[in-house]
Amino acid sequence: TRPAPPLGLASLGGELPSLQVVPFAEGDQLLLYTDGVIEARDRGREYFPLLERVPRHICDEPSRTLASLHDELLSHVGGRLHDDAALLLLRKPVLGAVRRVVDVPSA
């Protein structure tokens, strides 16, 4: 809710970051990302509009959400990123929810 400079660059801003406590209820998700994601540009030099694109990919399975966002990011830049980029999606489990078990054949 209160923007701050990126980690390690607090001395460049006029205000030091402060602790913020926000609710994180069951089923909530928190998306963490690096500047390589939001600074990825298309051929017209437009930045990747992450905040606009996230809502259309959110689902209850974080791996699917991330895969969809990653695909759209690569599509935006024409198939290849020119900077390092990372996306991490944390989801607080819903207590009592049934988890689907996937059989993975052993090697």
Image (cartoon, grey):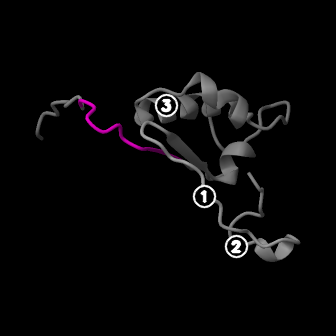
Front residue of 12/85: it is: 12
Could you tell me how far apart the alpha carbons at marks 1 and 3 are, in whole angstroms?
A: 25 Å
Instruction: Indicate yes or no whether the magenta region holds residue 97.
Output: yes
Residue 32 locus on image (x, y percent): 58, 50
* Mark drawn on residue 50: none
Q: Give the mark, 1 or 3, whose residue is nearer the N terminus.
A: 1
The residues colored magenta run: 88-98
Could you tell me how far apart the alpha carbons at marks 2 and 1 are, in whole angstroms?
A: 21 Å
Question: In terms of image quadrants, where is residue 81?
Answer: top right
Residue 99 locus on image (x, y percent): 24, 32
User: Is residue 3 left or right of 103 when viewed as pictured?
Assistant: right
Residue 106 locus on image (x, y percent): 11, 39
Tell me the amino acid under the disc marked 2: Gly
Question: Against 5, is 102 above or below?
Answer: above
Question: Against 25, is 69 above or below?
Answer: above
* Mark drawn on residue 65: 3
* Local crowd size for mark 1, using a 10 Å CA cut-off: few (<14), some (14–19), many (≥20): few
Where is mark 2, residue-wise?
A: 8
Q: Give the mark, 3 or 2, whose residue is nearer the N terminus.
A: 2
Determine the residue positioned at 49% across, 31% down.
65
User: Which type of secondary structure does the marked residue at label 1 adopt?
Assistant: loop
Farthest-out residue, bottom: 11
Determine the residue positioned at 85% across, 70% down.
13
How many marks overall?
Answer: 3
Front residue of 74/58: it is: 58
Q: Mainly helix, strand or loop, the magenta region?
A: loop
Asked if disc 1 and disc 3 are in contact, CB closer than 8 Å, the reply is no
Tell me the amino acid under the disc marked 3: Thr
Residue 83 locus on image (x, y percent): 67, 51
* Local crowd size for mark 2, using a 10 Å CA cut-off: few (<14), some (14–19), many (≥20): few
User: Is residue 103 left or right of 92 when viewed as pictured?
Assistant: left
Where is mark 1, residue-wise?
A: 21
